[in-house]
Image (tube, helix red, strand yellow):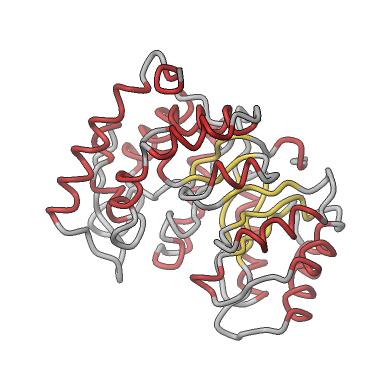
Amino acid sequence: MLNATQLRGILPATPTPVHADDTINIPASKKLFSWLLQQGIDGIVPLGGTGEYGALPRSERIKFAELMVEAMAGKVPVIAGVLDTGYHDALQAGREFAKAGVDGLLVLTPYYTNPTQAGVRDYFLRYADASPVPILIYEIPYRTRISVQPEIMHELSRHERIIGMKACNTDMYHFLQVVAGVGPDFTVLSGEDSLMPLHVAAGAKGGIVVTANLLPRAWRHIFDLAAAGRTQEALALHRQLIPMMNMAFAETNPGPMKAVMDLIGVDAPQMLAPLVQPAPELAARLHKEVARLMPLFEGQPAALAS
């Protein structure tokens, strides 16, 4: 069973390749899985926001999870996102993903209902008690309007089946407080491409990184430098990715990234309503920038940090 010590390094948050009829594009999905495995990822996170969870039909979510589990074949952990608004739908989704073979669940904080901190605490404790596989807490307050207080996170981290979190709270002091009160049986993973090296320097054991789908070797090198205490070098390398990140998130993720994934052999730019494909000018600029960066990390990824 998945445990906190296995959560380390670079875990791409994957998009979901789809056809125009909103069904899974199986050939494109398999190309994506193969590409990421070849690049040496440490885990993989499908069906989160990047995977357009809320717009994807439930049957297609399960199909995608099954495809990914088959492709990963136990080589790296598969942690499926669960982004439902209510407890019962979220638990049903988690059970279906577990049946499909995923190793863990990334469970979003309950949103729209605007719960108290006591409600958030009880939600995750109840979910963890019932979940067939270990869970990670997904905190992303700029999407959900729900921030988990550090003290509540510390309490949740002591549950044996709550093994980690994806930290997307951009408040660095909040992050520092969370890390200060969790033990070795709970892994904090950065969920922000823009802050990942700082999060690792402050105690994160890795990151669930969106643009690692495009530049996994770059992110691997940034992580290795930050984890080794070479923070300034990690930040210098990270700085070179800022123009790319600005473009990748200039419109709602994963639109811009999907538009340029032909660079890794995945030609599936279709989006699910209500999202649409990005402006052509943005896609063209991002395509050019990713194409410029990719050769710098092929073969000798250490060159930029020497």
At 76% across and 42% down in the image, what residue appears? 4
In-image side of 241 versus 256 (left or right): right
Quadrant location of residue 240? Answer: top left
Residue 127: percent from the left, percent from the top? 75, 66
Instruction: Name the quadrant of the N terminus.
Output: top right
Residue 139: percent from the left, percent from the top? 61, 64
Quadrant location of residue 120? Answer: bottom right
Q: Among all residues in the image, which is located at the extreme top?
A: 299
Q: How many marks?
A: 0
At 66% across and 74% down in the image, what residue appears? 88
At 29% across and 22% down in the image, what residue appears? 295
Instruction: Name the quadrant of the C terminus.
Output: top left
Q: Among all residues in the image, which is located at the extreme front?
A: 232
**Vertical arrangement, residue 51 with respect to residue 207, above or below:** below
**Vertical arrangement, residue 124 with respect to residue 222, above or below:** below
Q: Which of 106 and 91 is in front in this view?
A: 106
Residue 191: percent from the left, percent from the top? 55, 52
**Vertical arrangement, residue 146 with respect to residue 140, above or below:** below
At 40% across and 43% down in the image, what residue appears? 211
Q: Nearer the viewer, residue 93 or 173?
A: 173
Residue 271: percent from the left, percent from the top? 28, 58
Q: Among all residues in the image, which is located at the extreme left?
A: 281
